[in-house]
Amino acid sequence: MDDRQTLVSGSDVRSKLSLELERRARPRDRVGQEAFRRVILRIPRVDPLHWLAAQSSTDRFYWSGRSETDAVAGIGRVVAVEGESSVDYLSMRRDVGDILDRAPAGVRLFGGVRFGKRTTPDSDWEAFPSYRLVLPRFELRTLDDSSLLICNIHADESALGTALQSEIDALSVPADSLPGLPQTLSRRDEPEHRDWVRDIEWALEAFSSTTLAKVVLARKARFEFDANLDPFALMVQLLGATPNCYHFLFSHGDGTFLGASPERLFRQDGRRIQSEAIAGTGARGITDGDDDALGNELLHSEKDQREHEYVRQSVKEALTDLTRMLHVDTTATDMKLAVGRHLLSRVEGVLKPGVDAFDLLRSLHPTPAVGGYPYQEAIDVIEHLEPFDRGWYAGPVGWIGRDSAEFAVGIRSGRIVRNRLDLFSGAGIVCGSDPELEWHEVEQKIGDFLRVLSP
């Protein structure tokens, strides 16, 4: 059950929320079997990241698609669906479905899933379990000329209690400004350059002696600063530097995972499904002429086209049995980013009856764009060679509703813990890869963060 209100001024927000929640306690408001309800207030337009920065909750998130017009910020939690060991899509479907089946239209859970099946995460990833999808207590959604402040509640919370009232009272007005970014003290890469070259040479030998055709190897760059790094200030800078990307930030406990990803895993709208194959990387040019030449070079690169084809075929295979109609681009196009470019093939289809977002997650993740090909051989190599736990890096991040969902691939991302930032990025290794060029490709991919941190 929704209640959409007329514009409420900033000073009246807390009192108006309290009044609406008190009204929900009346017996005539208890309708149907809904276990969750929401109060929606329209308020003057608020910047979602400034609003997040002003809140004290240990659960905060930000999500926007390729267009910032669908930006959502959230704090607190009404309920969280979590998995502490391996990723279990059956349990996830059951628990999320139980919530959405008894929730009003428009309710979404936000969160992410680990990259791999590793059951014991590194201590650095303790705040981010195998999967975590949250129905937030408060959401802020941006409109053209205003914002929507949404309060989600359990049906049995309709009688305004002390705990809920304290959460309302704790809502703060947005910060006028955010802190500056601190100075970098040190950087350490894992693996270091020498070990990176060794690992790629190992993979190149494996291509000739095994069925392995592609493996994506990642690198972690750890930065330490002279003060704690504010994740919201960093995300504000990333938004400006990385247009046409998915932007995400999940802060839980003392850890924050954030990034600007160019890669969609899938979007579901009812029975319609959209996905992408993104693989093959090139540089942008300084002049228009240089840029056109570099784009043409990528489009005609045999190595990059071969790497791209592994991803395109894998996405097609993953979706064929789940769809009754599927169209996959047969020719890759040039996807231009602020820095760098990729080969892109679009995928669209119509899902078979009974297929849902959890089937899509299980079938599509991980694509060869972040894992490799064939799947199991590539995962075995990653677990053997990479000296760190990927955690949520390269895993699905996004949201899920009753008949819709959207997940990006959590690449071009980092993890913040107080004054430390770990940046993650990877490169697809195939026969013909050059270790030095792949090292520079990974450096280019974390360049969005580096430019923001060192303006």
Image (cartoon, rainbow, N blue to C red):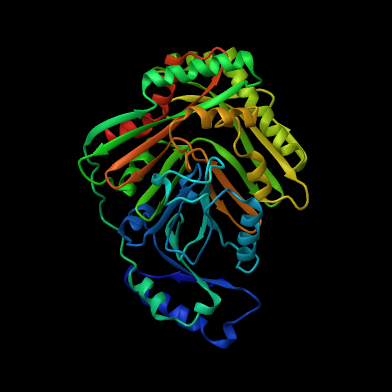
Tell me, yes or no, if residue 334 can be seen here: no
Task: Identify which residue is drawn at 62% across, 51% down.
Answer: 88
Task: Look at the image and tell me in which quarter the N terminus lies.
Answer: bottom right
Residue 407 shown left or right of residue 21 in the figure: right
Tell me, yes or no, if residue 210 can be seen here: yes
Residue 130 shown left or right of residue 328 in the figure: left
Task: Identify which residue is drawn at 47% across, 42% down.
Answer: 391
Outermost bottom residue: 27
Number of on-image labels: 0
Task: Look at the image and tell me in which quarter the C terminus lies.
Answer: top left
Question: Is 274 in front, or is 132?
Answer: 132
Q: Which quadrant of the structure image shows residue 164?
A: bottom left
* Residue 157 percent coordinates (x, y): 49, 78
Above or below for 400 versus 339: below
* Residue 58 percent coordinates (x, y): 37, 59
Above or below for 287 versus 51: above
Above or below for 38 versus 209: below
Residue 345 shown left or right of residue 171 in the figure: right
* Residue 359 percent coordinates (x, y): 68, 47
Task: Identify which residue is drawn at 73% across, 50% down.
Answer: 355
Above or below for 190 versus 128: above
Question: Is 118 in front, or is 167?
Answer: 118
* Residue 24 percent coordinates (x, y): 51, 81
Q: Which quadrant of the structure image shows residue 215?
A: top right
